[in-house]
């Protein structure tokens, strides 16, 4: 079974630009969640999608948004990039989602904002 | 505020020794705990989990201990191997929230 796939793996943007990251979950998994990982803040939950609906949301500004498609693939978008948005963005999938249960993580998209 | 934290940011052990990684949590409403391992350049990988109705759970070479009285979680790795070198972090959750610890970097010396 293929794992969680995230694209692109690395990208560089400048302040003010926007970025879209993509995540393909494990086949059969209906939940996709997104996380931001930085050295200073660690791993922080952004949001979770289940069957195309945002089910849970972390404490991030509205510049961070996401969506999920009917095939469970998900995208997250960050608009008006700031230097502090530089981070590893991780996507995870699970069969049922929620805050309990094993998460299957992708290898992440490393975003650098200049 | 409430937080999930790790006692030690780094841990260095000799190959073959046992490793103990600690995690403190402060949300008494957390009822599910999980340990993840993250190797360099990779995403986190599930190691073991435990629910609040248990004190101990064992896996292959790993044991998680939960002390609800002092809100403490630990991960024990038996006979640590070079492949165990990674960052380990805990997570606590309930139906409404999930938080991750900062992580402990485990280095295994040959």
Image: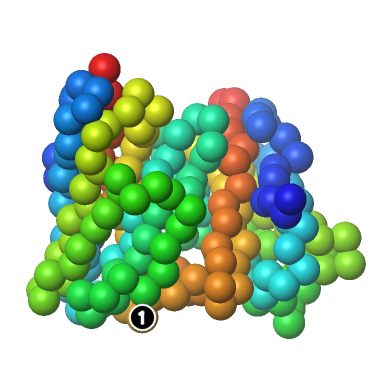
Q: Which residue is mark 1?
A: A96
What chain does badge 1 belong to? A
Q: Residue at x 18, y 36 (%)?
A: A18
Q: Residue at x 11, y 76 (%)?
A: A70
* A1 is higher (above) or lower (below) than A11: below
Residue A94 picture quarter = bottom left
Could you tell me if residue B78 is visible in this image? no
* B10 is higher (above) or lower (below) than A103: above
Could you say which is closer to the camera, residue B88 or residue B60?
B88
* B37 is higher (above) or lower (below) than B35: above
For this orientation, the residue located farthest to the right is B69
Q: Residue at x 50, y 30 (%)?
A: A39
Could you tell me if residue A17 is visible in this image? yes
Q: How many marks?
A: 1
Residue B79, horizontal then vertical, whole percent: 64, 47
Residue A106, horizontal then vertical, whole percent: 28, 52
Q: Residue at x 51, y 59 (%)?
A: B47
Viewed as shown, does residue B60 lie left or right of B52?
A: left
Q: How is the image coloured?
A: rainbow
Viewed as shown, does residue A55 lie left or right of A8?
A: right
Residue B84, horizontal then vertical, whole percent: 52, 42
Which image quarter holds the C terminus of chain B? top right
Q: Secondary structure at mark 1?
A: loop
Residue A79 picture quarter = top left
Could you say which is closer to the camera, residue A97 or residue A48?
A48
* A57 is higher (above) or lower (below) than B17: below
For this orientation, the residue located farthest to the top is A114
Q: Residues within 10 Å of mark 1 (few under 14, many from 20)?
A: some
Residue A16, horizontal then vertical, whole percent: 22, 27
């Amino acid at each position: 079974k293929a794992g969680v796939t995230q694209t692109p793996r690395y990208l560089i943007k400048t302040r003010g630009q926007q970025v879209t990251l993509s995540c393909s979950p494990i086949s059969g998994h209906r939940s996709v969640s997104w996380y931001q990982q930085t050295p200073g803040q660690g791993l922080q939950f952004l949001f979770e999608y289940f069957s195309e609906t945002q089910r849970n949301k972390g404490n991030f500004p509205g510049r961070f948004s996401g969506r999920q498609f009917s095939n469970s693939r998900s995208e997250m978008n960050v608009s008006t990039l700031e230097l502090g948005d530089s981070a590893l963005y991780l996507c995870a999938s699970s069969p049922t989602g929620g805050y309990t249960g094993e998460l299957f993580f992708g290898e992440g998209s490393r975003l650098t904002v200049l | 505020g409430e937080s999930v934290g790790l006692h030690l940011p780094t841990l260095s052990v000799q190959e073959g020794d046992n490793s103990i990684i600690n995690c403190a949590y402060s949300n008494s409403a957390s009822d599910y705990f999980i340990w993840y391992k993250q190797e360099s350049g990779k995403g986190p990988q599930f190691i073991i989990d435990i629910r609040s109705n248990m004190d101990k759970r064992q896996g292959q070479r790993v044991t998680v201990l939960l002390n609800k009285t002092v809100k403490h979680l630990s991960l024990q790795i038996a006979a640590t191997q070079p492949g165990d070198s990674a960052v380990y972090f805990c997570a606590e959750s309930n139906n409404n929230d999930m938080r991750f610890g900062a992580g402990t970097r485990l280095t295994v010396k040959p």
